[in-house]
Image (tube, rainbow, N blue to C red):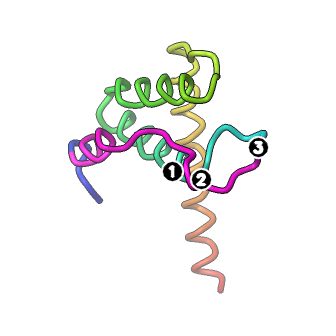
Amino acid sequence: GKSATAQIAWYNIKEPTNQGNKMNPNDKYSLQDWAQLFLLATVAAETGNNTPIENWVSQHSDDNGLPQPSGNDVKYLIEEALMFLEKFSENHIDNMYNR
C-alpha cells in the first residue's frame, strides 16, 4: 500500500463531499465519505497523527450542520473504523478460503 505520507498527501487534495453521490437523506455520510474516513483512521493509527482525521471530521461537520466532534469522538471513530476494517479483512479471507 501507499506510505502514510502518500496517504496524507492524498487526503490533502480531498474534501468531504456528498455531491453527486446517492445517499439516504437521513444519512450525512456518502460511501465516498466513509472511505475517506476509514483511510484517515488507518493513517492516524500508523502515524499517531490524528490531525488529518480531526480536520476532516471538523470540516465534514461544518459542511453538514453537525456538531463539532471532541477529541474523544475522533478517537472513538478511529477505533471503530479500525475494528470494522479488521472484521472486514477476516471475513474476506474466510470467504476466499471457503469458496
Quadrant of the drawing holding the N terminus: bottom left
Q: Residue at x 38, y 25 (%)?
A: 50
Majority secondary structure of the magenta segment?
loop
Residue 85 within the segment the image draws in magenta: no
34 w.r.t. 20: above or below: above
Task: Single out the mark in the foreground, 3 or 2.
Answer: 3
Task: Give the residue pinned by disc 2.
Answer: 31
Q: Are marks 2 and 1 in contact (CB under 8 Å)?
A: yes
Q: Seen from this angle, which residue lies furthest bottom?
A: 99
Q: Nearer the viewer, residue 27 or 19?
A: 19
> Mark 2 and mark 1: span between their CA atoms?
6 Å
* Residue 92 placement (x, y as % from top left): 58, 69
Q: Residues within 10 Å of mark 2 (few under 14, many from 20)?
A: few
> Mark 3 and mark 2: span between their CA atoms?
13 Å
Task: Give the residue pinned by disc 1.
Answer: 35
Task: Give the residue pinned by disc 3.
Answer: 25
Give the residue type that dot 3 points to.
Pro
- Residue 21: name its quadrant: bottom right
